[in-house]
Image: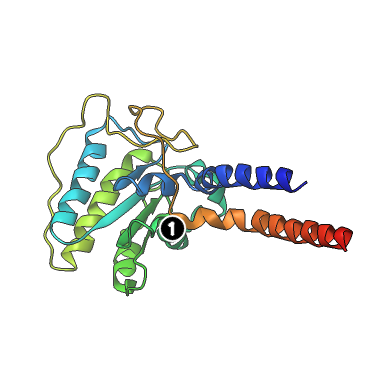
Amino acid sequence: MLRALVVAVVLSLAAAPAAWADGDPAGDVLIQQNVFYGSQLDLRSKEAAQLMALTEQAKEKGYEIRVAALTVPEDLGAIGYLWDDPTNYADFLTAEIQSVYRERTLVVMPSGLGIWWRDHEFADEQALLDELGGPGADPAAVLPLAMDAIVKLAAAQDIELTIPDVEPPPGGVPQPVSHYGQSQNAPASAPAQTSGGSSWLFALPALFVVLAAAVVLVRRRLSSRA
């Protein structure tokens, strides 16, 4: 019995990271690169390359930011209840990737934009984003608005950014593949990592079961010897 329970725990530990990552595709990607591209965006477009290059420029100048550019509810994976709620999703996403990244996170949805910077004040930045509004239902407007927002946010901190004149690499801007298969039109790359060290939480119930079973077995053996 105890051996079977130990096997069950090992299997649950192996499955835990995948279960955690499967909930939020952007969380899979943003622990590895600066931009998550929604499923309706063209990764072979010039704008896709420019947004990535702009985030790199911003980091070099002291305004580090990562971007989730979303187009449809499916881009949220299992977190669809936060669709049309960019600020709260930015909060959720920041928590997902905080083990590797703790600067600003920008979310772009058709309905609007949201920003989150854990343990910092960012109300003025959110107010600036509210003035910009959202890109609407046209996916082609998502990337230009994201770049416009980054330039304006940095300018409010007296940091001057210019949108880089770059072309996409052959095959398009690469994006790590999450469980959602988000980047079907992008070249394949390394498998997505899990979003931080929080996956150990999934193993706790199983560990408690094993410990409880071990205590019961030990007591029974001691009783039978008495």
Q: What colour-coding does the image apply?
A: rainbow
Q: Residues within 10 Å of mark 1 (few under 14, many from 20)?
A: many
Element assignment for label 1: helix
Q: Position of residue 139 (x, y in %)?
A: 37, 40
Q: Residue furthest front?
A: 226
- Quadrant hosting residue 125: bottom left
Residue 15: quarter of image:
top right
Q: Residue at x 23, y 62 (%)?
A: 153
39 is higher (above) or lower (below) than 224: above
Q: Point out the residue furthest to the top here.
A: 170
Q: Position of residue 51 (x, y in %)?
A: 24, 44
Q: Is residue 46 left or right of residue 29?
A: left
Residue 86 position (above or below residue 19): below
Coordinates of residue 96 in the picture (x, y in percent):
44, 56
Relative placement, left or right, of 43 versus 79 is: left
Task: Indicate left or right for 136 with 35 as reference.
Answer: right
Callout count: 1
The x, y position of residue 138, in whole percent, is 38, 41
Quarter placement of the C terminus: bottom right
Looking at the image, residue 14 sits to the left or right of residue 219; the answer is left
Q: Quadrant of residue 212?
A: bottom right
Instruction: Tell me if I can see residue 82 in this picture.
Output: no
The residue indicated by pointer 1 is 86
Circle 1: residue type: Pro
